[in-house]
Amino acid sequence: MPAAMPAAAQTTGPRRLIVQTALSVKCWLAPATTLFVSHQLCEVAVPVVVGLVIDRGIVDRDLPQLAVWAAVLVGVFVLLAWSYRAGVYFLVNGIQRAHHELRMRVSERSLDPRGFGDRQRPTGELLGIGGSDVQRVAFGGLLFVHPVAELAAVVAAGAVLISIAWPLGLAVILGGPVFLLLLDRFGRHLRSRAEHQQRLTADSASLAANAIAGFRTLTALGATGRASRTYADASERARVAAIATRRAEAWFVAVSSTATGIFVVAIGVIAAFLAFQGAITVGQLITVVGVVQVVMGPMEALAVNVGAVWARAGASAKRVLSLLEAPHARDTRAGEQAGPAATVPPALAVAGLTGTHLRGLDFAVERGEIVGVVAEAHDAAELVELLGGRIHPPRGTVKVDGLPLDEVDADRLHELVTAAPHAAHTVPGTVASNVVGIGRAASSPGDALAAAAFDDVLEQLPQGIRTPLGGAGRTLSGGQRQRLALARALAAPAPVLVLHEPTGAIDAVTEQHIGERMRTATAGRATVVVCSNPQLLVRADRVLVLRDGMLAAEGTHDELLATHPEYAEAIA
């Protein structure tokens, strides 16, 4: 069946995403733009008023005119300072709100139960896109504030210069756009370098996140050295690309600054020559020199904004769009045909399962059976994602009681499968609501908490299961949070349970208690435990050993210990 596209696919390109993000907070960016335009116009007005003070007050020795224009100068400075401060207030609020809204869109897409239909996305990639990339796209809103104000300063400066000597004004007004177009073409190389560097940085972050998530398995398999070397190579490539990008950016800024400097100095020299000939007054000469000095800043900033800032925002926008526009692994409408299957006690069947790392995997888990899986970190992570229905396999099927998961309504997927991630998270609320959920607060979490060996923690909490926890669960240790997450998975009603290293942060004694209680806690469910913990594997009905994404061995824990030395090393 064709994969469904999310609503965010309305966006057609990186530039449009940047524009849409800025327009979403136009009620903040519009006043910010107006205030920054006022600030820049005041900057241009300062040398103009200074010239009038000289010509009409000092040269003519007219004290009333001197007082009037001095007062005007003070007023310009007051408006200049107030416009800047107020503009910063509106701009910061607008950018932060745009950042928040886009981050929420990315978070919702990342957590969408329909998953991704094109490929698996590592945690590191999702964090990179939801973090630095979203921030750069949001900061692209600066391009709709500062460049407008800077362009207003250039136009105002050109008008002032035309009123004094029209060739100078035409040089600024006509030469400025041509100058910017040339810089934009020069900035294409910088944009391509920025995209390459951000992609390599994201890849290295993904490798780091995946290695940390699967550290226990990597250690058990003796693969930490290879994982470390892989990350080091990726990090080195990202470092070299970052240096090359910064070097290109430095060259861009240097060239644009030099060209701008030459441009404005030439105008200043022409003005000095006109003053020497008596074509303009001393005050007008000072005005021209002052305006040229003022306009140098906006012109340089324009060059940087349309080059460096736009390059970073555009590169990040491509990565954000790759997530927002990714096809779903399943269509929500498919649930219309999936109703009856959810009520049948299911068994889990995997046939020809193939993904990025897995190749032609076949196995089945009957109701009431516990199956352990020992695999390398990337194989284990992908298997949990596929069994949980979070991603759609390129080939093969995952079925619950004969029903393919990709035909199940995403909103009802949790009724069939509970796939608990390796990371342990808590949500704001009590211990009870963290286990059974707010909507099922009437349910008792006691059995699940006892099965997860969390009962001793309850004795230390001031209000027992009614003790409130913060969003990050800071009142609990890492092992206690993992036990709470395991209790949540055990309390879920889904008939298929998939656990990924559920005791990775728990001490050996507590692991033994959990292993002893696992059979009772999972009675009547098809349970898959992806781990390298012998305390859990010894209680599994059988264990699957994966190598290079394929099934390499199968048997009970004791049989594999006796016949497969590699298995003994993996769980040692």
Image (cartoon, rainbow, N blue to C red):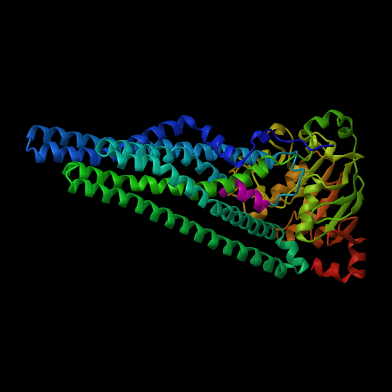
Q: Nearer the viewer, residue 174 or 46?
A: 174
Residue positioned 39% across, 40% down in the render: 174
Relative horizontal placement of residue 489, taking residue 103 as reference (left or right): right
Occupied quadrant, residue 417: top right
In percent of width and height, residue 81 lies at 29, 39
Q: Nearer the viewer, residue 62 or 43?
A: 62
Look at the image and give the residue range highlighted in magenta: 123-133
The verdict on residue 5 being magenta is no
Residue at the image point whose x is 85% and y is 48% from the top: 527
Q: Nearer the viewer, residue 164 or 291?
A: 164
Name which residue lies at 89% across and 42% down.
399
Q: Quadrant of residue 332?
A: top right
Q: Can residue 524 be spotted in the picture?
A: no
User: In what quadrant of the picture does the N terminus appear?
Assistant: top right
Q: Is residue 452 visible?
A: yes
**Which percent across, then down, holds residue 97?**
51, 37
Q: Is residue 125 magenta?
A: yes
